[in-house]
Image: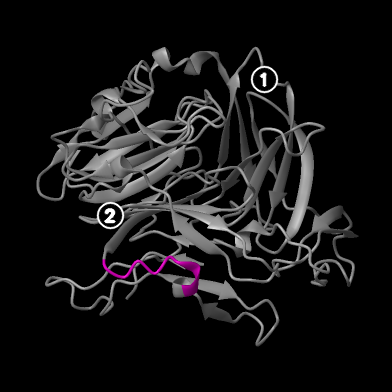
Amino acid sequence: MFANNEGPSNRRRHLLSHRANYMFENNCGNTTAGSYTEVGEAAGVKDPNFTGRGTALLDVNRDGLLDIVYGNWLGTHRLFVQSRGGTATATPTFTDVATADMKEASRIRTVIAADFDNDGNEELFFNNIPGDNRLFQKIHGVDADWIKINIGAAREQTGHGTGAAIFDMDGDGVLELLISHGESAAEPLTLYRASTETGVNSNAYLRILPKTKSGAPARGAIVTLNAVGNQNENQQMRVIDSGSGYLCQMEPVAHFGLGSDSAAAATWSVTVQWPDGVRVTTTKTKNAMHVIKYPVVGTQVQFIGCRRDSIETTCVLGDATCGRSDAPASGAQGNSAENDAGEKDGAEKNGAEKDAGEKDAGEKNGAEKGAGDKPSSLAEAGVSNSTTKSGGRVHSISSMLVGLIVVFIAKAL
């Protein structure tokens, strides 16, 4: 578990006396069950001199390992890429690969990783107060590094964004971005989506909503997408997360862009790994939202143990041995991604409850760089509800499909 900490300030004496981040490594049965060891310094994510804010998880280089991107209040922002040591059981290490534009200090509140234009590549959105939001793009296999791009009105140079969240508001397979404002003065919410110039309307998508045994959103689950018949081609990974920003919460859906609809395959291989190590692989069609329920007792499943050197086994759920084996492969390196960067805590999060299907979206307008000819990637979406657009001192945004929320507390008390 990664905890991005907010350090002391004159106004907040009750917070930690330091600003260092924590990373807790699951001991996986080596000691008392359910115990953790703090390894932040060894992993390279301590970052002791800044006050953390928004945090998001993504697989930056598509190597099957979770990486961490987060913002520091008036400090250097980070993009930590994970790597494995020489042995399968060694603590993972992280290297900051943020570009100069990405590192540039700002009054950041929220960080979001999402594929806004459905081209098959996640963008990174930084929400600042006041204004000057940023959007970064890296096309897999094309761009050497992340590029700061123009995001049009979503730049919000004069806005005082206090939080942002993403969701598919109208069910058309395109993510919206909702930004809240206020704190120092009442300001309206803003709502954005990718502009038509990005080609979003001709791109395909696939959305996965995994459920727990009780039917709740399976927060902490990992969803992996591959081309059918080729588990290494165009692999994408998403984490069902409770939020990635200051007082914000995202929808519990793994959203995948597939690129051009005419070129995208009709069906895709989807693997859901629940936090307990149970895995299910199924085939799903594009341009649809699919609910994947936790398998019932008697179902044949795959299982991966807690240890990083665990190997995947096939078993029948409910059998005495299913879900209990954690035997390491000799020298093998497991791919239980949730144990590496596992669950992530943002700087501060607070979940508000919303009805099924409700979502949040926000806006971006980047600086003018790279992907240079690419038009503004986000356009303001029409909002006819006067209540939604009315000004107010809004601090938190939540995007949910159900009313029950599990909140990961990121602020260290």
Q: Position of residue 370 (x, y in %)?
A: 35, 25
What mark, if any, has residue 264 been given in the picture?
Answer: 1
Badge 1: few (under 14), some or many (20 or more) residues near its Cα, within 10 Å? some
The secondary structure that most of the magenta stretch takes on is loop
Task: Left or right? Give the position of 295 relative to 65.
Answer: right
SS at circle 2: loop
Q: Quadrant of the C terminus?
A: bottom left
In this rendering, is residue 78 above or below 380? below
Badge 2: few (under 14), some or many (20 or more) residues near its Cα, within 10 Å? many
Front-most of residues 129 and 183? 129
Q: Where is residue 57 in the image (x, y as percent from the top left)?
A: 49, 51
**Nearest to N terminus: mark 2 or mark 1:** 2
Residue 48: in magenta span: yes
Residue drawn where x is 29% and y is 36% of the image: 134
Pointer 2 residue: 76
- Residue 397 seen from this side: no
Residue drawn where x is 50% and y is 41% of the image: 356
Residue drawn where x is 32% and y is 55% of the image: 247
Task: Left or right? Give the position of 359 relative to 34.
Answer: left
Q: What stretch is highlighted in magenta?
A: 42-49
Front-most of residues 273 and 85? 85
Labels 2, 1: front one:
2
Task: Left or right? Give the position of 43 relative to 221.
Answer: left
SS at circle 1: loop
Residue type pointed to by label 1: Ala
Q: Position of residue 310 (x, y in %)?
A: 77, 66
Residue drawn where x is 84% and y is 54% of the image: 301
Residue type pointed to by label 2: Thr
What mark, if any, has residue 48 been given in the picture?
Answer: none
Task: Left or right? Give the position of 373 relative to 263.
Answer: left
- Residue 223 seen from this side: yes
Q: Position of residue 18 (x, y in %)?
A: 28, 77
